[in-house]
Amino acid sequence: MSMAGNLRKVTNLGGVGGLRRVARLARRRPRVDLSHPARSPLGSSVVNCVTYRDGVRTPARGDLVDVVERVRKSRDGFVWLGLHEPNDQEFAGIAELFDLHPLAVEDAVEAHQRPKLERYGETLFAVFKTVCYVEHEELTATSEVVNTGEIMVFVGEDFVITVRHGRHGSLGPLREELESDPQQLAKGPSAVLHAIADHVVDDYLTVTDSVHEDIDQVETDVFAENGARADPGRIYQLKRELLELKRAVVPLSRPLEDLATRPIRVVDPEIQAYFRDVSDHLLRAKEQIAAFDELLNSILQAHLAQVTVAQNEDMRKITAWAAIIAVPTMVCGVYGMNFDHMPELHWKYGYGMVIGVISVACLALYRAFRRSGWL
């Protein structure tokens, strides 16, 4: 029976003694492949569990407890256990086996944490926010642009436990990429931690490039000929989604700085140089997000200015037409008064003369407003 198959039973127990009893029963079950990033076909949260020695994947014999004991006795290699959205019951046995701190276990199960790095004894606990770009045919005021998830990583001297939350951020391809470079993987669990951090930050850059395209489209629409009629809701929606991305990216600066500069026992000194490279990539993502935020503010201000200009133009047109209409209104108002003695009141051509004067005056005002750009 594969170690991953036995591990399903591990997640349902709270004690190591119970782990061994169930593992003996689990050997009767058929072999099951849990290597893909979907949830286990056995219904467990376990995605994969693999041991590595000198950077090479090794076959696992027996249950998880036996494998962990062999790794610890030989002091050679480590175990990588991957989970997807485990509950308290599923995680209890694993937490006891690897001696994980209750506070870190609670964070890993509950999720919704800020990116952070904490040390509990000899165990390092890191939280990463994963992001992905949500494809859409047309950006609207309600479009989802950025979707977030989480990856929690427990790192010890001889183990790595990854807990993933969300529908994206699969580590399956990352595991395959690491296995193709045994020299890097041989540096231990910290190499896996670096690969996860690098993978997450690379996704940040990919998402920022896609968001940039949306911002360019909004900018083009705003500065188009009828830009004042553009929907400002799209700009606000982009700002909200950018804020979601910012919450994932900005808090990760301090954890990466600690990993790159501070001596940590479970982090190989050679790996720290790689973390500095990841930190540089994160800085680029932060600068892009800050620039996008300023650009969206400028686009919004430009749109509001265009609306104000359009309103002023409408008011000028209304004022011009009101001035033109005021001429016949004034003349007709005068001749509407009931006085017996008024100029040209009983003249045969008086009506035609008044209509002519009104027409000429209105035409002159119309041409004057057209020359000044009011009409």
Image (cartoon, rainbow, N blue to C red):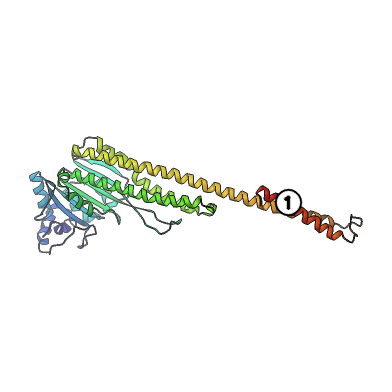
Q: Residue at x 51, y 52 (%)?
A: 224
Label 1: how many Cα within 10 Å (few below 14, some 14–19, many 20+): some
249 or 161: which is nearer to us?
Answer: 249
Task: Inspect this view and state whether residue 336 appears.
Answer: no
361 or 126: which is nearer to us?
Answer: 361
The residue singled out by tag 1 in the image is 365
Q: Residue at x 75, y 54 (%)?
A: 362
Residue 174 at x, y = what percent?
22, 51
In the image, taking residue 134 as reference, residue 60 lies left or right, namely left
In the image, taking residue 304 as reference, residue 163 lies left or right, namely left
Residue 286 vertical placement versus 84 (above, below): above
Three-letter code, disc 1: Leu
Task: Inspect this view and state whether residue 227 appears.
Answer: yes
Residue 361 at x, y = what percent?
77, 53
197 or 348: which is nearer to us?
Answer: 348
Residue 161 at x, y = what percent?
20, 49
Q: What secondary structure is marked by label 1?
A: helix
Q: Quadrant of residue 289?
A: top left
Q: Quadrant of residue 73?
A: top left
Q: Residue at x 21, y 35 (%)?
A: 263
In the image, taking residue 341 as reference, residue 254 lies left or right, namely left
In the image, taking residue 19 as reference, residue 106 lies left or right, namely right
Q: Residue furthest top?
A: 262
Position of the N terminus, as image quadrant, is bottom left
